[in-house]
Each structure stands twice: as C-alpha cells, then as structure tokens.
Image (cartoon, rainbow, N blue to C red):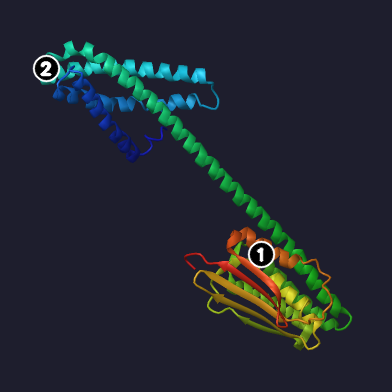
C-alpha cells in the first residue's frame, strides 16, 4: 500500500500541502487575466486538490524505476512521459470541472477562457508531477537509509549476543576445572570431605546451568550462587576461608549472569590458597545514583608465586562488560594495601 494512504493522518497532512499550491495556481491564472480572482480560486483550488490524488501515482512510478537500477536517459524519459500523461489527464479533468462550475455558478464566459488557461494548467501540472516524483525518490532513499541503519543495529545486536554466548560457554569449563582441582586435593587427604564436596559441587553446577542460560539475573541470585561456590571451597579450606557478603540495597538490580564467579574464584585460588592463616573474601555492592558498584577483595601474599593460570577469568569479566555495556561499564583489579581488589561498576537503567 502507498505509505501516504496507509494512515489517515498521513493523507490529511499530504492534502494540506496541496491547498497552498491551489492558491498559487489561482494567482497565476488571475494575474494572467484569464479569470477573475473569484473564478480563479473556485476553479484552481479544487482542481489542484484533485491533482494531489493523481500525483500519488508518482510513488508507483519511482518504485518501478529506482535510481540505482536505471540509467539517466531512461529515468528522464520515464519522468517526462509520466508527467506528460498526468498533466494531460488533469487538463481533461479541468475542462470538465469548468463545465460543472459554469452550470452551477452560471458563469458563461468560463468555456471561452479555457483555451487561454490550458497552457498554464498543463505546465503547472507537469512541474508538480516532476516535483512529486523527486519527493518520492527522496522518501525512498530516506526509507532505504533507515532500513540499512536498522539492519546494521540488528547485526550489532546479533554479534554482541553471539559474543556473550561464547563467553558464557567459556565459563562452564572454567568453573568445572577449578572445582575439580579442589576435589583432587582432598581425594587422598580427606575422602569424606571430598565426597561432601562432590555433593555440594553437584548442587552448585545445577544452579549454575539454571542461571547461566539467562542474560540478566538479580544481584541477590548471583550472590546466592557465589555463596554455594564458597561453601564448596570451605570444605577444602575449612576455617582458613571466611565469607563476608553484603549486597546493600542492590539485591534487585539486574546484572549479567555469572559475572562475579571468576572474581571469587581468583580470590580463593590466588589469595586464600597462598596464606597459611587464610582470610576473608569480602563482597560489597553499592547502589549509586546512576550505577552499581561491586567490589570483591581478599587478602593476598605480596611474595606469592606468579600465578600459573591463563587469566581467563579476568579477561572474561572485562569482555562481558564491554559486550553488555560498551564503554559505560568499568572494571579494575589490583593489589591495594595487602588486599587484592576487583571493582566492577555498571550503569543502572532508569527503572532501577
């Protein structure tokens, strides 16, 4: 369907544009002395409004002759032929309309003036149709530009979703690898603890699969999963591992699922594991005016050996934040006064 005819508001706005054009044609006819001002207005305004409907066909003509597919010669020929035919039809309608006005208003001099007015009406109609075609081409180019922009945004969203899915796919093996290392350490030293750890791990992995498939989860759910992971690790480290979690008033804020898990794993594997007396893994959340700040910190041994890990966890967190929030999210990690601190800041939505 024609875009102007698809909505009554569009049609009303379109026809409003033709009213001043009818006044312009009336002025031309009156200034030429063909008709008086009253006769010119009575003839030109309704006639021009009708021509507005006739010029709607320009959209179909331009759709069949797109600029990027036809040459300039064919384009000019098509435009001239369509404008000539439309103006000829309009001239016939004008002759009939003069007859109607003559009968209703009893202006017998109108037919004799038609010959003098015909060139002006025809030329005016020819020009208006060419302008209608130009407007149709501009509208088509604008629509194509918006469609290309829309497709580009869709491709960006699909690429970002694919990247997030790939990052989440990296997390599951990472969890399992670190957890199996912990179980392996207990297998010979404390078989009962190893079995208990396996049961806790099964519960943890079951919850991980349920939450990991979702893009966003409440912070409270994320922290509940973290507590289950730390319960697994507490079987191994016993009193050496303490847990201090404070969600503040941000429990209902949505965060990327499993975002904090690599940070907590690093806190245990590269912090608590290297201290004879252990320490506390602290997790804090603070809701600010436009952002949510989450910190994960743990005591660390400044003389600890260089980590043998690949750094996958921290890279994963950084990439997920970039994919989910672009440049609006911040991630920092490093030693601060004997404690290793990872700090995440993500923007809040208006509702949050």
Instruction: Report the residue at 75% width, 69% height from top.
Output: 175
Q: What is the CA distance from the residue labelled 1 to the residue labelled 2?
A: 83 Å
Residue 120: image quadrant is top left
Q: How crowded is mark 2: few (under 14 residues within 10 Å), some or many (20 or more)?
A: few
Relative height, residue 88 to residue 347 (above, below): above
Q: Which callout, 1 or 2, points at the residue further toward the start of the chain?
A: 2
Instruction: Report the residue at 75% width, 78% height from top.
Output: 268
Residue 212 tag number: 1
Residue, far right: 188
> Could you tell whether 187 is left or right of 179 in the image?
right
Residue 83: image quadrant is top left
Q: Residues within 10 Å of mark 1 (few under 14, many from 20)?
A: many
Residue 310: image quadrant is bottom right
Q: Is residue 337 visible?
A: yes
x, y percentage for residue 80? Answer: 42, 17
Q: Nearer the viewer, residue 92 or 344?
A: 344
Q: Nearer the viewer, residue 266 or 174?
A: 266
Q: What element carries label 1?
A: helix
Residue hosting label 2:
107
x, y percentage for residue 84? Answer: 37, 16
Instruction: Report the residue at 11% width, 17% height from top.
Output: 107
Viewer-nearest of labels 1 and 2?
2
Q: Which of 39 and 267 is in front in this view?
A: 39
């Amino acid at each position: 369907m024609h875009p102007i005819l698809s909505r009554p508001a569009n049609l009303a706005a379109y026809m409003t544009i033709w009213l001043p054009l009818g006044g312009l044609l009336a002025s031309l006819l009156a200034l030429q002395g063909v008709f008086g001002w009253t006769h010119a207005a009575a003839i030109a305004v309704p006639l021009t409004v009708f021509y507005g409907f006739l010029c709607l066909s320009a959209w179909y003509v331009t759709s069949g002759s797109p600029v990027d597919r036809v040459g300039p010669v064919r384009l000019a020929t098509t435009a001239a032929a369509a404008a000539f035919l439309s103006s000829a039809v309009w001239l016939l309608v004008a002759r009939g309309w003069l007859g109607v006005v003559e009968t209703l208003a009893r202006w017998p001099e109108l037919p004799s003036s038609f010959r003098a007015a015909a060139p002006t009406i025809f030329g005016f109609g020819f020009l208006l149709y060419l302008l209608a075609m130009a407007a149709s081409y501009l509208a088509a180019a604008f629509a194509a530009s918006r469609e290309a922009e829309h497709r580009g945004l869709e491709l960006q969203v699909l690429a970002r979703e694919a990247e997030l899915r790939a990052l989440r796919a990296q997390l599951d093996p990472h969890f399992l690898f670190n957890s199996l290392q912990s179980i392996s350490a207990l297998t010979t030293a404390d078989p009962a603890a190893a079995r208990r750890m396996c049961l806790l791990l099964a519960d943890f992995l079951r919850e991980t699969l349920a939450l990991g498939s979702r893009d966003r989860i409440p912070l409270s759910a994320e922290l509940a999963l973290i507590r289950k992971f730390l319960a697994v690790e507490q079987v191994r480290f016993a009193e050496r591992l303490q847990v201090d979690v404070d969600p503040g008033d941000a429990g209902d804020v949505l965060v990327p699922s499993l975002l904090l898990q690599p940070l907590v794993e690093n806190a245990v594997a590269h912090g608590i594991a290297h201290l004879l007396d252990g320490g506390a893994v602290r997790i804090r959340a603070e809701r600010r005016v436009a952002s949510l700040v989450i910190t994960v910190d743990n005591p660390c041994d400044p003389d600890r050996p260089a980590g043998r890990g690949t750094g996958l966890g921290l890279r994963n967190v950084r990439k997920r934040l970039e994919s989910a929030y672009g440049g609006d999210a911040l991630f920092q990690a490093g030693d601060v006064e004997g404690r290793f601190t990872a700090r995440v800041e993500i923007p809040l939505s208006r509702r949050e």
